[in-house]
Structure formats: structure tokens, C-alpha cells
Image (spheres, rainbow, N blue to C red):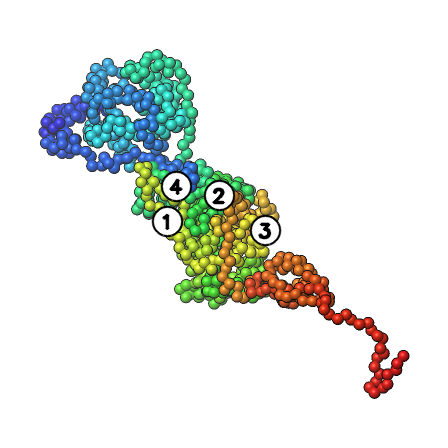
Amino acid sequence: MVCAMDSDARGRGKAGAVRRLAGYSALAGLLSALLVLPLACVAGVGARDSAEWLLTEPVDLGDLTTPQRSTILAADGSSIATFYRQNRVDVPLEKVAPIAAKAVVAIEDARFYEHGALDLKGTMRALASNLDGSGASAPQGGSGITQQYVKNLLYVNAETDAERQDAVETTPGRKIRELRYAIAVEERFGKDEILEKYLNVAYFGDGAYGIEAASRRYFSIPAAKLSLGQAATLAGALKNGNQYNLRLNPEGAVNRRNTVLDRMAELGVIDTATAKAEKDKPLKIKITETKNGCTESRAAFFCDYVQREILTNKIFGKTPEERERLLWIGGLTIRTTLDWKTQKAAHKALLRHVPAKNDEGKAAAQVLVEPGTGEIKGMDVGRELGPNEQRGKTWINFAADADHGTSIGMAAGSTFKAFTLAAAFDQGMAIGDRITAPRGYAPTGFKDCKGKDVSDTKVLTNSSDGEGGRSFSLLTGSWHSVNTFFLLLEKKVGLCDTVKIAKKLGIKRADGKPLQEFASFTLGFNDVSPLRVAAAYAAFGARGKYCEPIAIKRINTSDGKSIPVPKAGCEQVIDKGVADAVNYVLSGVLTRGTGRGLGIGRPAAGKTGTVDNYSAAWFAGYTPQLASAVWVGDPRGGYKYPMTNTCLPTHCGGPVYGATIPGPIWQDTMAEALSGVEAGRFQRPPSFFFRKGSGEDEVKMPDLRGMSLDAAMQKLGAMGLDFKVGSHEYSDKYDEDQIVATDPSPGALIDPGDSGLTVVLTVSKGKDPTALPELPDPGWPEPQEEGAPWEIP
């Protein structure tokens, strides 16, 4: 085709006819454009080049794709959530029932397999029908399946309203552009491929794009199982997905279905009797709602975390727009780290202790991280993801940092003391090193990492779940969570060194700002997220190996290609022996410290955290296999709404400590999450850390004399004391196998945990059989004065 009329005058001579023809339909616009419009004027090219331009493949054809829905999967491959702008699931033609493909071809383009990009016979017939009024009450279209595919493809790739309007408006320019793409499509793909693409891009109404999504939406079956009646119904909806919506307009859908069946019979695809029988059947639909986004997910806050990871991390695109397109239309399969068993345990425990709609207005959050991998196994807030003004709902993910949930974080309280403890061990201090902790202390002489004095003249005291006024070791000071002890310990090891250890363990402020460095750093005034605390404690469980927490394991695009995802970057950040010493000390918190009674029947360690004025409470605990951090507080503001007289299902009246509600949440979660999992063990710290004893408070050596050897051994074992039998001796006082003596001797002060202490037992052999018998007293008188004679009776 060439431009035969280059002059304005000739162009104006055809203008009226063009306008009349264009007004009938898209078909009339196409034909009028092809036959009478100067291509050079429409395309902006010279007459000699117009035919070549029409037949040249558009450079962007390969970039045009149908928007695909992305799916987030748990570690076991089950679905967490789906994201889409258009509900579409692409399937190959072999996964579409053959009768469905035949129904679509019959009603949309019966000569599809016979013509090329343009069906001239159909176009001329439709034009004639429109011009003489004999065809139908409405103008007839002439676009075949290929052209309809192109129109749909251009529409779904439009970025703006103007581009979308341009993709569907009835103008000669649009029809010529559409034809140009159709020619290229016919050149590049076979007919079955084009039909497959059309079936996957077409709109079937009610938000269903593509035949697979439509089949699932209306009939709750895959497209491969469509029956004749179902296939005809969906094929009929292609003419106008909104007008023939099966759910909203069943009567119109049935009438259109019958039209399709008649057309199939007319073409010989089915016989007349079959068409009639099918037309007599009622329309039966079974709607399946396809969830979109995280709000209805069973793991809504974990889902939201993954979503924000993709939308904020530049590894997924340089701009926010690129990242958003990737998630919502990129057809991603996102495999995550979520373990349903752990997730369900966390959710159940949170709601048991802090119900979503509790009258106190309190909330709770928990994150569980796997030591040694950084994989987030569970994350929950114990509320529904939704508008904050609705009771029991929140958009804020209190478990994560601001960039992954809009939370600015919460003061972590005494959970930060573990970092000071680690810094002390890192500097070589022993478990038995002692500090006398006063009841009140004004922290002076502190400097931050820039050398600036950050002392405070305000006297800080011990919280109600701690104590002071005596000497504590690193062990007992941690068990009792003594504030003044840790302030003095932090001063001893250095504020900056404590901060550095915390940073090595991944601690960051939730709002993204640098950690604030003041004397009370060890008391946990910095606002952080449970995720960061859980990841830090997971490093203790992994013997000093810190892993950046990750939620995504891998991502594949719709064509199966993998794309990069954030890595955990695991690194040994503190010495294994240092971590072992921390684990040894914090294990006792669950048995003899502020977390007493929170054991889970396997080796575990943890730390309570009670924030000033009971504004929040925490518990961070871990085993070698799983670490968790739990926060309980008030989203309206902890200082304004403290937990001083809180009444919740498992605690009513009195203040809330770390062991009051957060601890039991942790205990319930861990017990269920780890059920059936073989228990791991912590490693005993190097003997170097016990060079000053175990750190336990001294006790008096019991008096074992006269006890049987078995009874004595049982008593010493119960006290955690090592012992050995030193010797067996004859004794006139104690029977055989009874204890004669001990070293240390009875009443001596001893350290039960001193690894260098071994009680030596001396055991009786009974009386000496070789000893001469005692002679009876002859009754001699007492001697007289010196020189005086004896008087013999």
C-alpha cells in the first residue's frame, strides 16, 4: 500500500467519507483507513516508505507482555498471598479444554486459521452489512483474534489513562497501528500460539483476565476441565466482559451462551441436537474469590514484610515504580522462609495472652529467627492487618523496622544487658568477677564512641524485678537483672565497646537513625524492633555467628528465570567461647533468675526486659535451633498508657514484667514450634571463664559425717558439686561405708559452680580388726603426792 494522494486538497476530498465510515465501528475505521487515508499522513512517513513501514516489526513488540500475578509461598510451597493488578494465570493451550478453544474461535473469528493478520473477506462483509443496514441493529466488527490480541496487549501495557484510551479509541491511526502489530505477530508466531496468547490476555469480566482465571473465578475449576456449556458461556463473555458478567448478569450471560452454541452448530463444531440440549440447561456458577494482597493472608504481617522488602530494596529495581511493577504484574513466584508450624504457634500464643480486641488496648508482637541462617520462621502482631481506627486491626507491623512496617520501634529494656555481658566476656572477664551494685547510681565517667562525655547526674535505680545493695557476679547480676550492676559493668568494659558489640549483632534503631549512645544504653532505651532483637539473640544461639534476617529464599519470574534476592551474609562476629559464656549465664535466667519457670523442657536461654514505668515488656529467648523476641505494649504510647494494673486473660492486676506476659508467650510458642524437633545443646564455655569460680553465691559445705556414701553422693550431686572418694580409713566412731571426713570441711564457704572445686570424701572401713582389745580398768588408786608411798588395799 502506498500514499496515492499527497496534496491537502485530495485529502480534504475524502475527509467527509472517512468521518462517516469511521463512525460505524472499529471495522469501518480500519477499512476506511486502509483504503482511503494517506498512510504517509497517518504514520508520518513518506509515500514510498509507507508500505515498508507497515510490514516492519515494531521495535517494542518483544517488550509487550501480559501482566501476571505474583505469588508468595511459604517454605513448604503453600500459598501465603497473591498480588495482581489483573487476576490472570497464563496457561499453555494444551491446558485449555479443546471445546473451549473451539467455542472462542467459532464466535470470535471462525476463519482464524484461514486468514492472516487481516481477514479481508470478513472485513468487506462487515462493512457492507454496516453500510446497507442488513447485518444487525448494531454495527459489525471485523477484527480477528490476532488483532483483538494486539488491542488487548497494547491496553494492558499502557502506563497512563491517556495511553489506555489511545489503545482502544476508534480511530484510523489506532487501527493501522494495531494492524501493523498484528502483521508482526502473525509473522513471529503460529496460529495456535496466537490463540493461546489471546486466551490468556482476554478479559472475561468480574476481574478475571485470561481463560484460566475466568474458569477458576466462575466455575472453581481449571480451564482444562471446562464443559461445553461452560466453554460457550466464557466465549460469549469475550464480546463484553462487563455486559455478560456471569455473576452480575446471569440472564444476559445465558442468552449470549446460547448465541455461541448456535454459532458452533452452524459451523459444524457441534450438532444441532447437542446445542439445543445444552441451551436448555441452567447456568450454574461457583464463584471462587481470589485474594489480592496481604490483608486476608494467614500470615498477614509476614506477607507485608515480604511485600515491603520488594518495594523498598533496590536489588529489585532502581526506582519505586520499577519495584512496584515487578511485584504487581511481574508474575513472580516468591519462595519464603516462613514455617507454618512456627507461625501458627506464634499467632496462637499471642492471641491467648493478648487478644486482638482486648479492652486494655494492648498489643503484642513476636518474631522467630533460625540461628545460623537468619531465616525468619515466623512473624506476627496478634492483630489483623487493616485500618488502625478499627478495633483489633493495625497497618503497623510492630515486629519490624520502619522501612518494613512503618513502626518506629520500642524501647527494648533489659534485653540490651546481654550485649554488655558479651562485651565483658569479649574483654576476658570471668563469670565469677564481682561488682558491688548500689541501690542507686548516677552514671558518671561515660564516653561515647566519639570520645564525648555522656555522663548523667540523675540517679538511676533498680527496677522492681531487680535488686541492689550487695555484690553480684556476672552470673548473678544477669540472673537478677540488676540495673546498677550493669551500669557499672558497662562503665568497666566501656560504653563504646558495648555499642560495638550490639552493632556487630545487627542491632539498629527501627527508625533507621544511628543508635543513641548514653550511659543507660545497657538499660535498653533505644527504640528497636523485635526482629532485630531476635536476630541478635539468634547469633548467641549460633555461637557468635550473626546472619542478617531474611524472609525470601528465592524468586522466579513467570518464565522460570531466577532473580537475585537479599542474602543473610552470615559472619562470625564474636568469639565462639564468648557466645558460649553468654549462653551459660542466660540459661540460668530461665531456672534461677527473673525468668524462673519459663523453661521449655530443653536447653534454652533468655533475658527478660521491663521498660521504665512499665511502658512495655519484652522477652528474648533462644535455643540452638530457634530464637524469638516478644514485645508487649500499648500502640497509643507506653508512657501514657503504662502496664501498671493491666488485666488480660493470663494476667490481671499488678504491673507487667518481662516474665509476666512476654515470657509465657515465648514459652508457649517455643514449646509448640519445637515439638517433635530433637533438642540441641549449648557448648560449655572454656574453663578460662571459670577461673574465678562459677559466679554463684557461696554456700556452706554441708556436714556429711555419718551419712552413707550413697546418700552423701546424692546430696553433693543435687548441689551441683563434683566429688571423689579420697581414702578409706578405719574408724571406731563410724560404721563401714559411712563418711568420716570431707575436704572442704563442714561449714566452710564454697562456690557450688566452681569448676576447680572437688569435694574429697573419706570413707569409713569400720573398726580396725588388728587393734589390741582394751583391758579392763584394774581399779588402781590415784597416785599420791610425789614421794608418798602407795597404799595397797
The secondary element bearing badge 4 is classed as strand
For residue 287, what is the image quadrant? top left
Q: Is residue 578 left or right of residue 564?
A: right
Asked whether the viewer can see residue 238, the reply is yes
- Give the mark, 4 or 2, whose residue is nearer the N terminus: 4
Q: Which residue is under mark 3?
A: 597
Residue 342, label in figure: 2
How crowded pointer 2 is (Cα within 10 Å; few <14, some 14-19, many 20+) is rated as: many
> Which residue is label 4 attached to?
335
The Cα–Cα distance between marks 4 and 2, rounded to whole angstroms, is 17 Å
Mark 2 and mark 1: span between their CA atoms?
22 Å
- Looking at the image, is 443 positioned above or below residue 135? below
Q: Earlier in the sequence, mark 1 or mark 4?
A: 4
Tell me the kind of residue under disc 4: Arg
Query: Disc 2 residue type?
Result: Thr
Which residue occupies 26% across, 35% down? Answer: 64
**What is the secondary structure assignment of the residue under circle 1?**
loop
Label 2, label 3: how many angstroms apart (C-alpha)?
22 Å
Q: Residue reaching furthest bottom?
A: 787
Residue 47 on image: x %, y %: 11, 31
Asked if disc 3 and disc 4 are in contact, CB closer than 8 Å, the reply is no
Task: Tell which circle, 1 or 3, labels the residue nearer the N-terminal end.
Answer: 1
